[in-house]
Structures are given as structure tokens and as C-alpha cells.
Image (cartoon, grey):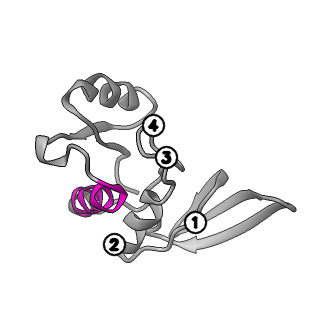
Amino acid sequence: MAARSRWSRWPRRGDVGASHRAGHGAAKAILISDDALKGSDALGTAKVLAAAIKRAEPDLIIAATESSDGYTGTTPVQVAELLGLPSVTFAKSVTVDGQTVKVERQTESGFDEVTSPLPAS
């Protein structure tokens, strides 16, 4: 599996946030910042993140459900769709075994176990 990276689309003041993310086990942090992105919607953000992520060719993309600014909850699924990757959402635990990722996720009725080939989002 490729080295872990953290990706963020954040205004310039977010430099601290990107370095903070790198401190959570990522090999590096990549900050995407451009004044032209100010006020972009979830799909615009997903397109920018997908383009940047595609260059790194990761095996697994792990994203939070929502950002602190938009709260749409759609960006991770949009990134997966734009990259043509399977999307497994609401993971409570993640296990990677060779070319497969196994995710346990919480549902209203308990837990589901989902398996997906890598690469995945």
C-alpha cells in the first residue's frame, strides 16, 4: 500500500490544520489552496480533491462524513464517483488484507460488514 497522505482543501489559514492532520499518522499532508476555490460547493470541492488524489494513486481514501464549513456529507461519495472507485461509508473499523478492504459500519439495526476490492474510497 502506498504511503499515507492527508488531503485538505482549505483557505491559506488552514496550513496549521494540514500539518495537524499529518500528525495523525500520515506520511505527508497536502494542502490545496487557491482563492478561486473560495465559496465552492461540495461538487466543486470534490472535483478539486479528486484531481489531486488521482495524481497520488492511493489504494485507500478515508474521508470524514462532513466538513466543518458545508455539512453536506456528499463530498466523499462524490470523490469516489469521480475517481470511479467503490465507496464504503460510515466505517467504524477498517481492515486491509492484501487487495481487499473490510469495513464494519454502524446502521440503525446494528452493524454491517462490507468488503470491497482496492483501490476504494
Identify the residue under disc 3.
71
Q: In this view, does 107 lie above or below 14?
A: below
Crowding near pointer 3: few (<14 within 10 Å), some, many (20+)? few
Give the alpha-carbon distance from disc 3 to disc 4, as whole Å.
6 Å
Residue 106 on the magenta segment: no
What residue appears at the point 22 percent right and 56 percent down from the top-left corner?
Answer: 52
Given the image, on which type of amino acid does mark 2 rest? Leu
* Residue 22 x, y percent position in the rendering: 36, 31
The reply to whether discs 3 and 4 touch (Cβ–Cβ < 8 Å) is yes
Q: Is residue 92 left or right of residue 26?
A: right
The reply to whether discs 4 and 2 touch (Cβ–Cβ < 8 Å) is no
Q: Residue 88 carries which label?
A: 1
* Residue 121 x, y percent position in the rendering: 47, 63
Give the alpha-carbon distance from disc 3 to disc 1, as whole Å.
19 Å
What residue appears at the point 33 percent right and 37 percent down from the top-left corner?
Answer: 27
Give the alpha-carbon distance from disc 2 to disc 1, as whole Å.
15 Å
Q: Earlier in the sequence, mark 3 or mark 1?
A: 3
Given the image, on which type of amino acid does mark 3 rest? Tyr
